[in-house]
Image (spheres, rainbow, N blue to C red):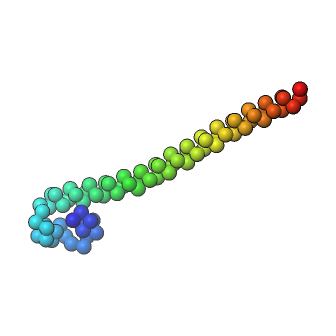
């Protein structure tokens, strides 16, 4: 019913008559569905950003490790 209300295929009054549910319930479900969809979309964007940030941190850690190893090997080769 919420999807039907979102699509606008039928008015709320028609949905009330069709399903026998009060219009307040339909409007509440419609609002909750829209809010839920917004959360899903923004959640994906946040998850993608967090994943990217985590990848950058791993790369920085690897760069640091390689610099330390390079410096160690450079000092060891001079002996």
Residue 64 falls left or right of residue 4: right
Q: Is residue 73 left or right of residue 61?
A: right
14, 69: nearer the viewer: 69
Nearer to the camera, 28 or 61: 61
**Residue 63's image quarter?**
top right
| 28 relative position to 49: left or right | left
Quarter of the C terminus within the rendering: top right
User: Residue extending furthest right?
Assistant: 79
Q: Is residue 31 left or right of residue 64?
A: left
Relative vertical location of residue 69 with respect to residue 2 in this rendering, above or below: above
Which residue occupies 41% across, 51% down? 43
Q: Who's the residue at 36% across and 52% down the image?
A: 39
Tell me which corner region of the image, top left, top right, bottom left or bottom right, holds residue 75. top right
Residue at 44%, 53% (x, y): give it: 44
- Image point (24%, 60%), residue name: 30
Q: Quadrant of residue 23?
A: bottom left
Specify whether residue 24 is in view.
yes
Please provide percent x and percent y for residue 61. 64, 37
* Residue 28 vs residue 77, the one in the foreground: 77
Q: Is residue 13 visible?
A: no
How many numbered dots are placed on residues in this image?
Answer: 0
């Amino acid at each position: 019913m919420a999807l039907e209300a979102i699509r606008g295929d039928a008015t709320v009054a028609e949905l009330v008559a069709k399903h026998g549910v009060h219009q307040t319930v339909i409007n509440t479900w419609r609002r909750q569905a829209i809010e839920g969809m917004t959360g899903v979309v923004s959640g994906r964007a946040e998850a993608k950003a967090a994943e990217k940030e985590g990848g950058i941190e791993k790369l920085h850690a690897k760069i640091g490790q390689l610099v330390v190893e390079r410096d160690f090997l450079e000092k060891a080769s001079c002996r």
